[in-house]
Image (spheres, rainbow, N blue to C red):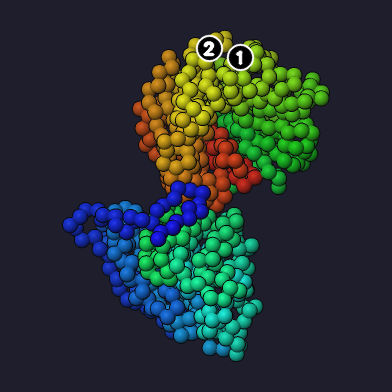
Amino acid sequence: MRRTWPMTAVALLLVAGMAAAAPAQAGKDRSGTLTTASAPSAALGEPIAYTVYLPHGYAETRNQAVRYPVLYLLHGRGDTMDAWTKIKGDLDRMIADGTVPPVIAVLPDAPWNDRGNYYVDSAYKDGRAVETAFTRDLVAHVDGSYRTAAHRGARLIGGYSMGGAGALRFALAHQDLFANALVLSPAVYRPLPPAGSSAREFGAYGDGDALFSDAVYERLNYPALVPHLDTDLPVHMYIAVGDDEWANPDPADAVHDLDYEAATLYNTVRRSPAVSAEFRVVDGGHDWGVWQPSFVDGLTHLSATLRATPPAGLPEPRYGTPGADSAGGVAAHPDGTVSLAYAAAGPVEGQPNAGGLDAVVTRLDAGRPLWTRTFGTPANDRLYGAVPVGAGDVIAAGYTRGDLDGAHPGSPADDGVVARLTATGSRAWVTQVGAPTAADRFYAVAAAPDGGAYVAGYSSGSYAGPSAGDKDAVLARISAAGAVVWARQFGGTGEDKAMAVAVDGSDVYVAGVTSAGLPGTTYRGGSDGWLAHYTADGQQTWVTSDGSAGDDLFAGLAVADGTAVVTGALGEGTAGARDVLTAGYTAAGRQRWRLVTGGRGDEAGADVVALPGGDVEVVGFTDSALGVPAGAYDVLTVRVDRRGRATTVAQFGSARADGADAFAEENLFATSAGDRVLVTGLTDGDVFLASVDPATGTP
């Protein structure tokens, strides 16, 4: 019998077939080596014996500058370091076929407490400080003796049975050392081990003369560690157990069967924001029939975050309040200053919060605030874009649910809003528009040649024409003085929103999402992305769409060397949940190229920045390993050349979700600033601002 429980938010990696993968370059010896050695340990007062696996090519001259990730693999009670040597062939094969990067594996021996030490520092009268010895002395020795990548992201701690308990303990108690954990059939119990468990027998959890202490066990056990985990040091964990583990005949202890306990462990750690966890139940018992294929599957999964190169992080400082804030746009000015727009849930720079979310614009000079202006109402006021105009002025657009311009008292629904601030932060004007009793929002803004702007969004009423459906897309021309020159409303029978707008001379492009298709386009099902062209006086000349039978959209737009480039999400026909869909169109509406970028997880494009020479930088978010993963969702950058080919793909971020909100919707904005790309977005309730090098795609 074979059972697999796909308890995961990402693509399931099947155990079946992993061990049978054919090695690359058949006929050539790609084997690594096994060597025994020892590490001095002050904590134990005697050396730690271990076997080390070095990958093929480690000793070659051409690889002498290469640094390697390290696996630390802990054996079970009563076993020795020789037990893990049976996975050498799996490592050779997985490295040769590219499933995992070349790694070093350290297989330590743990003979203390009659090989029942559970890898903890024992307080028993004959106990030993095994945990300190391994996490301090052994790791330091390995980093000093081999060409390791000496950071937490390049270390994996793994083990089975007692070793699984040790791997779990090390991963949670030593987050600074290990970012990855492979926990197989762990001998862990909640709250205490059952009668007859070896955890009670050898003094690992003893105290003084007592072989076992309830208090010691509970202090060292995972329920005591999980509430105090550091979310800035995320742990990626793979847990596996057999479906034929020994069944305790005492009904009172049935909850301590290891398959039951493993499920309890998984459902505990998966609720911690500091842990991303996978759980598998596979056919077999407490033996290598479970551990060997689970090692292969688990290492395959964890290889996405086991990297010699550390991830690129988010720069400091963060902007916002202790509340839940949101990014709202970024504008780069000719004098080198930057206007950062966001929505704040509390007071900012001594300026009181009017209620709900307030719109905020901060002018920065080399990261130093020159001035900050908030404007809001007792309801929510939020910005969705900012552009530079005139001699240092900035225009920002979004929505308000209150009376932001002083001419809409008692407004019952959202209105679109556009505001202009001067170079010194004074409010030049605020324009508030919309259908009288229906919701209207602006989601994008682009500078117009005369110092005004184009804004785009939606109306759920009849703001600029009769309503065609649930929501209609809106495009409006705003003068330099804040007057509405013209506005256009268009849509189909469903929900239609404009999410992006761009200007190229007299050509105006607007893009968005439709739930039932727009007139003149082919509806593919779910939601589609669309792109439309307008003249400077507001005449639509063409509209086109793209997507799949799933949920798709276009969220970002720029014009590069005459090509309108849109980006967003493709919801079906992808390797993961969604992929980034980017496409280039001629001024006549013909699609010149189409690029899909994605991995096993979820990603979407949010903005596009035109670069010199016709290239563009696509900015979005991903929870796949398209570069070096940093946390939950990372900021994704894709440099695309004028022919639609991805030349650089990278990601960066913090340990938390970056660039996406709690609903996995984009909250990212980008613009060009000289030879850099400025990216602002959401991170853990605050706002970041990063200056990205287009050559690398990272800050």
- Neighbour class for label 1 at 10 Å: few (<14), some, many (≥20)? some
Q: Which mark is residue 22?
A: none
At label 2, which amino acid type do we have? Gln
Q: Residue at x 63, y 34 (%)?
A: 328
Q: Are marks 1 and 2 in contact (CB under 8 Å)?
A: yes
At mark 2, the secondary structure is strand
Residue 562 percent coordinates (x, y): 43, 19
Place residue 196 in its image quadrant.
bottom right
Residue identifier under label 2: 540
Q: Residue at x 30, y 73 (%)?
A: 35
Q: Earlier in the sequence, mark 1 or mark 2?
A: 1
Q: Residue at x 49, y 11 (%)?
A: 541
- Nearer to the camera, 178 or 339: 178
Residue 495 visible at all: yes
- Nearer to the camera, 116 or 409: 116
Residue 214 percent coordinates (x, y): 63, 79
Q: Residue at x 60, y 90 (%)?
A: 209
Residue identifier under label 1: 488
